[in-house]
Amino acid sequence: MGLRNVTIEVLKKIFDKYGFHSLRKEPFLYAKNEEIGISFTFKDPLYGELTRLFLTESEEEAEDFLGKYSWYRKYGQKYQIEIKLSDYKKNTPNISFEKNNHAYTLQEMIALLKEEKVEIKEQEKKDMAYIKKLQRTVTLLEEILREKEKVAQDTYNNFLQLQKEYNQKYIRFETLKKDYEKSKKEIKPLEEKTFQTINIKYPSISFSEDKQKLEEQIDHLLNEIKIIETSSDIIYQKYELIKLPLEIEIINQKIDIVEKALKKKRGLFSKKEKIEDKLAEIDSSSVVNQMVTYESYEKNEQERLMEKYAMIPDLDKRTIGDFLIEFDNLNIKESKVKEPKEENDTSLSYEEVMQDLEKEFESRKNEEKKILTLYHSIIKYLFLKNSIISEKNVDEFIGILDNPNNIMIKLKYFKNIDTSSPKKCIESLKKEAEKIK
């Protein structure tokens, strides 16, 4: 091949363009007699390391080959593209860059990188969406923790107030009774229980965009919520908030009986009444006697909470906040962060559409919500087609309902659907379909 439209100087510029500057590293410039080209080395899967010549007759050929070879050196292994020779015995064979018997052009090679960039960009969008969902969960859990802390503090304050009120009533009752019986016994106030102040450890919420840090914040907040909910002190106070009002009512009745007895006793012609029977009757007929013991109450509460928290490991971290809000029926409003829009973009984002739908849905009565949710599930198929759904077809529906991520939907809207077996599920679905009609 002869030297035609390409020179050493032009070839050097192409070498520089693709970053091949060193005279000690291949590829090398090749020039002998009238021949000019490129000496290069590559690894062949069968023959190992090979060195060959690419002789060029034009600047375009040199540009095309060095572009492909440069790409091959950087990305060939990643995209599984290999150098193929027309004749492995010749030093100057025809050279192609192939995958699955397809010889790639330089444009096709560059296109692979562009596709990768698009894929990377799409993945980045997905990652960012995931991060935002984690940030949302962190925000929700912080709100839930503040709500739980407030409820716990209110519970404690109410407990102290009722305990104090009961003890005051107790002192009054015992004093009246002592006066009535003309007793000299010493009246001691009841021991008042106090508890340590709740100490919540709030993490530093900085709206990190680091997935691991956000997940650590979620785990920490969840643990703090669990500590409050499962605290024996708080469970005890909740029990006493049920019991103390009943005991105050009882002691008020006792005070009334003793006060009336004292008035009669102080009259000119009255005589002392036996009030012990009346007081004993109040005690025996008290609803407090029908209450479960604190030990049973605490055991049931702890078991209920453990069942709730046993579901969480199976949940996607993005849904934990929603699960807790739904499970405990909390009235927590999250702050919506809107995405910036491009100029002249009047379209509604997915989030805005969902917000409108959720707002419209929440404005409905509870019974309407249940019916809408049921109708837009598998029941819609039953209702419109008027068909008999088979046990095989209902398996998918059961799988959806039993998915841990759907637990809050199941608890709220599908309580009446029996998923223990396809047959029982169909029977319960038919009953719900009748309600829709």
Image (spheres, rainbow, N blue to C red):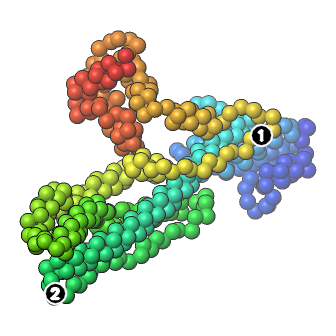
Quarter assignment of residue 55:
top right
Percent of width and height locating residue 419:
26, 33
Residue 396, labelled with which disc? none
Residue appearing at x 17%, y 62% in the figure:
293
User: On the image, which quarter does residue 298 sit in?
Assistant: bottom left
In this rendering, position of residue 357 left or right of residue 275: right
User: According to the image, label 2 marks what residue?
Assistant: 185
Residue type beneath disc 1: Glu
Image quadrant containing the N terminus: top right
Between 380 and 55, the residue placed more toward the observer is 380
Closest to the observer: 267 or 111? Answer: 267
Residue, x 51% and y 68% (percent of image)? Answer: 202
Q: Secondary structure at mark 2?
A: loop
Among the two numbered marks 2 and 1 on one chain, the one whose residue lies closer to the N terminus: 2
* Residue most extreme to the front: 268
- The numbered disc on residue 342 is 1
